[in-house]
Image (spheres, helix red, strand yellow):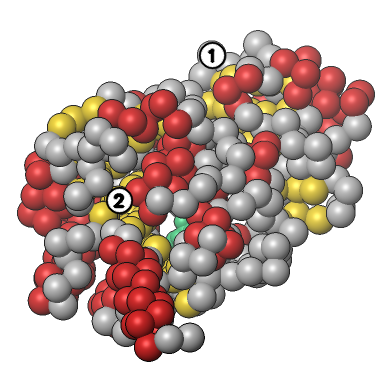
Amino acid sequence: MTHRTLLLVALLISLGAGSVQAREPLLLIGIDGLRWDIIDRHTAPVLRALAAGGVRSQGLVPVMPSKTFPNFYAIATGLYPENNGVLDNASYDEALDMTFRMSLQDDARWFEGEPIWITAERQGVPAATMFWVGSSVENQGLRPRYWHPFDGSVSNADRVAQVLDWFALPPQERPQFVSVYFEAIDSASHEFGVDSPEERAAVAAVDASIGQLLEGLRVGGQLEQLNILVVGDHGMTNLDADRIIYLDDYLDISTLESLYSPQLSGERQGNAVFAAWHGEADQIDTLYQALALAHPELGVYRQAQFPEWFHQRHPQRSPDLILLPEPGWMVSKRGVPYTGPRANHGFSPHERDMHAALIASGPAFNSPQVVEPLELVHLYNLMARVLEIEPAPNDGDPARILPLLVPGR
Ligand code: AMP
Ligand code: ZN
Ligand code: ZN
């Protein structure tokens, strides 16, 4: 090689490196139980400012059931539960004859489809997850370059510090997709109720943590080129002891106990806001006949009649029958005490109280604007577009996210 060619190669390499770094990184902030209106009901100066200067959706429509695992994993994959395997926080698999639960966060068989951090890694874009549902398993032989198994005892301050450390890495090692997750608001709402002082305090605390994160990024010089998505997984609504449907008032308890419901069986006798049942056809039929017209607040659906929008038709995990009470109602058995939670989610995704919040901020977004409610399966395409990577096949409609983006993005 001549001296001149060498110089040219060096120049091209540096330009190449420059263009990789020119990619705007994406920070995905997942806030459990961030209902669509919660920043208006409580003091949240940081999130309000992000929303006012960015794109805010009137609501982020969850998948059914409006629970944590199905929704955070639908955000990550752009796939409905029937296509990504995460049908509920607890889901029975008929072929494996086992129940996946949240504690099995490192069992790769749970998590089907391709989450955004794998899409990124596959295309040479380094990813980092400071917690996310499904991020603790290998997928196609890949993992996020940096990740932590979920551990609720890690403080919000430590989560923020980890994210800032990743953004402070030298350019070649720095992740360009980073997720971070906070559960404090969901926990407070469950225990103390919607609009409780404790919920208010949790919103203020999480808002302050995000404030520290943004301030750290500003000081580090990363904020200006950063795209940020703040997402909730579902909303929340209050419950009470007078709104319980006792299933054994309508059918023989032995019939009930011969069937299996991950939400209501065995040691998990608790009051459920959504219950999926598995059993033989004749037992399911008995359950259906007994409950179909039993209670005005109880929806009862056999698998063959699942509305399309349930998206619960997984080949091995599809329940045989689903009980879906009206908002604020629970199903239970006599003798099971109701000791909380005061508020819950899991109701129909069409209910306004179940809608989550979506705030997008950064150079990729067509801001400021307020957009119509958006289903959360569309976010995977949005993230792929912002990161300038090719999305894997998914259930989102790319046309739905165009209004959120700067024209041409
Ligand atoms: P939910 O019962 O739907 O309200 O679930 C909320 C809880 O999910 C949180 O309080 C966390 O403890 C738990 N959680 C969130 N993310 C994960 C994860 N990646 N792995 C295991 N558990 C999680
Ligand atoms: Zn949740
Ligand atoms: Zn919750």
Specify whether residue 274 is in view.
no
State the image coordinates of residue 342 (x, y, percent, origin top left): 37, 46
The one nearer the camera, 120 or 57, is: 120
Hey, which quadrant is residue 290 in on the image?
A: top right
Which amino acid type corresponds to the residue marked 2 in the rendered image?
A: Leu
Residue 344 versus residue 205 in the image, above or below: above
Q: Residues within 10 Å of mark 1 (few under 14, many from 20)?
A: few
Q: Secondary structure at mark 2?
A: strand
Which residue is at 31% across, 40% downward?
409
Mark 1, residue position: 296
Which residue is at 45% across, 31% downward?
398
Q: Is residue 164 left or right of residue 234?
A: left
Mark carried by residue 95: none
Q: Is residue 62 left or right of residue 205?
A: right
Specify whether residue 305 is in view.
yes
User: Do callouts 2 and 1 mark residues in contact (Cβ within 8 Å)?
Assistant: no
Which amino acid type corresponds to the residue marked 1 in the rendered image?
A: Pro
Mark 2, residue position: 229
Observer-side mark, 2 or 1, equals 2
Query: How many marks can you see?
Result: 2
State the image coordinates of residue 294 (x, y, percent, origin top left): 64, 15
Measured Cα–Cα span from mark 2 to mark 1: 39 Å
Residue 36 versus residue 310 in the image, above or below: below
State the image coordinates of residue 269 (x, y, percent, origin top left): 65, 50
The one nearer the camera, 4 or 244, is: 4
Q: Is residue 349 left or right of residue 198?
A: right
Which residue is at 36% across, 76% downward?
8
